[in-house]
């Protein structure tokens, strides 16, 4: 490993990040970057060549991050793994090596928009609904199936993942290191200073690690194989769309769902069928009921797609109302909490806390607002 590259990674560490179980704080590593860059580069080189991964790099403190709903329900928390900072630096170097191979050989399917350079939630939404609205403009009935994997990142089979990495031509040395990095992992839950016992992890890629998202993209890359409809992904958030005018077109969508169910079974994944929803679009839509694994999927009149509300009429008024309500709620909190009305105080707060909610994917849900810049830059009048 190049010493200068290691020094650069050390110098760019975010000193406010939390350390992993080894308690090596990023601030200490950053301040000692000139001294420890060379010995770390030697350790990294030997680890990569031999495939031996230190035990500290295979440990994680799991911190629950609240999402939404009732705080007493454990299912409403996202587990994030805090891992070793030196281990993460080597992960970054190996990630760059793997990505150069995947990108150079166009391995990752174009339908994947998550954790991919130059793609985002916005590109996902615009590219998918551009095709959907095109069909609607032609007077066609369209069905969209929003798919939900159950604990997707936690159920990744290490054996299947390694097989796919070899299939996609990643070099054996890197594959061996990844295999050993995933093997014999342990983790514990940390809440308010209290820790659980260490538990062995037999599947999944660590959420919060550097390599985790890239490895998941490799794992789910072949989900599209054999699917005839329009399928698009943002990591594990997947949706399938297709014209549903004739019986043959509806049967084609059902066959695609059967293929996706078969893929999940083959790859030891499961769909949370209760959260899989169908959105029926178009005036002549028969609202056919689709099935997965013998269970009927529920229909919906409005779905939150990557944070944007989409209804069965493709009317974005609900999204506009939701964005305005959220922005006004935060403005109210600022008004009640901050005594000063100085521009130097209010404008930074407005820019960092309010504008992101008004601007999120606005090119998708409100492209017609030509005076949007005036709206978003308007200052609250109290």
Image: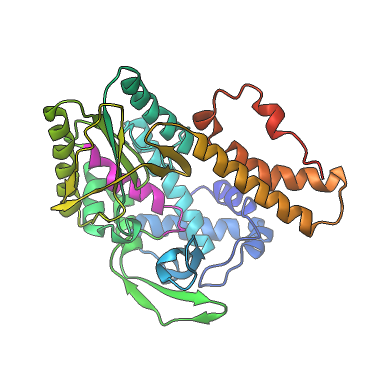
Q: Is residue 113 left or right of residue 107?
A: right
Name the residue at 28% across, 68% down: 202
Tell me where the magenta segment starts and ends, as one range: 207-224
Name the residue at 71% across, 49% down: 331
Number of marks in the rendered image: 0
Give percent across and percent down for residue 93.
47, 48
- In the image as oriented, which residue stretches furthest toward the top? 138
Q: Is residue 214 magenta?
A: yes
Q: Is residue 121 magenta?
A: no
Q: Is residue 284 above or below residue 207?
A: above
Q: Is residue 318 above or below residue 230?
A: below
Residue 111 visible in the snapshot: yes
Q: Is residue 219 left or right of residue 83?
A: left
Give percent across and percent down for residue 163.
21, 50
Name the residue at 65% across, 45% down: 327
Q: Nearer the viewer, residue 124 or 196?
A: 124
Give percent across and percent down for residue 9.
58, 50
């Amino acid at each position: 490993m190049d010493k200068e590259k290691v020094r650069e990674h050390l110098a760019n560490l975010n000193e406010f990040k939390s350390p992993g179980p080894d308690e090596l704080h990023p601030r200490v590593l950053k301040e000692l970057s000139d001294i420890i860059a060379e010995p770390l580069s030697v350790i990294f080189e030997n680890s990569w060549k031999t495939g031996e991964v230190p035990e500290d790099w295979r440990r994680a403190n799991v911190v629950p991050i609240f999402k939404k709903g009732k705080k007493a329900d454990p299912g409403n928390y996202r587990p994030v793994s805090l891992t070793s900072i030196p281990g993460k630096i080597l992960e970054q170097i190996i990630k760059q090596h793997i990505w150069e191979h995947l990108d150079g050989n166009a391995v990752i399917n174009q339908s994947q928009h998550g954790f991919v350079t130059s793609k985002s939630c916005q590109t996902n939404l615009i590219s998918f609904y551009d095709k959907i609205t095109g069909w609607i403009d032609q007077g066609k009935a369209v069905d969209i199936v929003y798919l939900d994997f159950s604990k997707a990142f936690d159920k990744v089979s290490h054996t299947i993942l390694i097989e796919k990495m070899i299939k996609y031509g990643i070099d054996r040395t890197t594959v061996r290191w990844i295999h050993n990095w995933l093997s014999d992992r342990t983790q514990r839950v940390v809440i308010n200073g209290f820790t659980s016992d260490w538990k062995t992890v037999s599947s999944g890629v660590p959420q919060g690690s550097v390599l985790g998202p890239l490895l998941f993209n490799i794992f789910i890359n072949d989900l599209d194989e054999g699917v005839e409809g329009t399928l698009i992904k943002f990591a594990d958030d997947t949706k399938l769309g297709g014209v549903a005018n004739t019986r043959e077109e509806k049967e084609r969508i059902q066959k695609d769902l059967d293929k996706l169910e078969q893929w999940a079974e083959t790859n030891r994944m499961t769909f949370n069928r209760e959260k899989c929803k169908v959105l029926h679009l178009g005036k002549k839509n028969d609202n056919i009921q689709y099935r997965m694994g013998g269970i009927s999927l529920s229909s919906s009149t409005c779905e939150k797609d990557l944070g944007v509300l989409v209804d069965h009429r493709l009317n974005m008024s609900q999204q506009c109302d939701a964005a305005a309500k959220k922005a006004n709620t935060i403005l109210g909190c600022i008004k009640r909490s901050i005594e000063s009305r100085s521009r130097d105080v209010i404008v930074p707060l407005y820019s960092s806390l309010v504008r992101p909610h008004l601007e999120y994917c606005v090119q998708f849900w409100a492209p017609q607002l030509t005076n949007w810049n005036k709206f978003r830059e308007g200052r609250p009048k109290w």
